[in-house]
Amino acid sequence: MISDTDPRHTSRKLALSSIFSWSFCEPDIDKNVETSAEILEEEGVSYDNELTKFIVNGVREHTDEIDKIIEECAPDWPLDKIAKIDLVILRIAIFEMLFGKKTPVKVAIDEAVEIAKEYGNDTSHKFINGVLGTVVERYLPKEKDAVKKE
């Protein structure tokens, strides 16, 4: 289980809220991150600002590529039918796994599943885990055994 006090976990949740807000308004990355970070700081919660900005900027830069991967790996679920929060969680995890290359694949999947349990619906974590499993099979076949063994 990932600790809620882990700054990297908190950074992913901060990135989630910033990216999620794009669904409702034009993205202003710095403003979104800054607003959410202020709330965390008031509550005395630590986070990794560098990681947050890395994820937010990376997802923004690679959204089209990431969305094509999601469409391929979840063919029964058009993007507009996937719950917005689940879509953002998938985008973050796929960015970290395929483009960011700073986070081990297993960690990216575990983080996505934990965040889905916290913010998604009752089946979000299963859906997220299934899609990310397909991503690993298709795009990271060398990681497949390492992800399943642990």
Image (cartoon, helix red, strand yellow):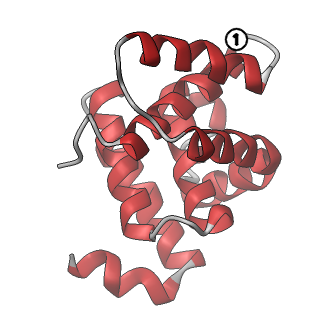
| Residue located at (58% from left, 53% from top) | 75
Q: In which quarter of the image is the C terminus?
A: bottom left
- Tell me if I can see residue 83 in this picture: no
Instruction: Locate residue 57 relative to residue 86 in the image: left or right.
Output: right
Q: Is residue 105 above or below residue 54?
A: below
- Picture quadrant of residue 3: top left
Relative side of 38 to 47, left or right? right
Badge 1: residue crowd in 10 Å (few <14, some 14–19, many ≥20) = few
Q: Which amino acid does label 1 sit on?
A: Phe
Place of residue 5 in the rendered image (x, y in percent of width and height, measured from the top left): 27, 35
Q: Can residue 108 be seen in this view?
A: yes
Answer above or below: position of 127 versus 28: below
Q: What kind of element bears circle 1? A: loop
- The residue positioned 62% from the left and 45% from the top of the image is 50
Question: Does 104 sit above or below residue 13?
Answer: below
Q: Nearer the viewer, residue 38 or 136?
A: 38
**Residue 51 pos. (x, y %):** 57, 47
Whether residue 63 sits left or right of residue 42 in the image: it is right
Q: Where is residue 72 in the image (x, y as percent from the top left)?
A: 64, 60
Q: Residue at x 31, y 42 (%)?
A: 6
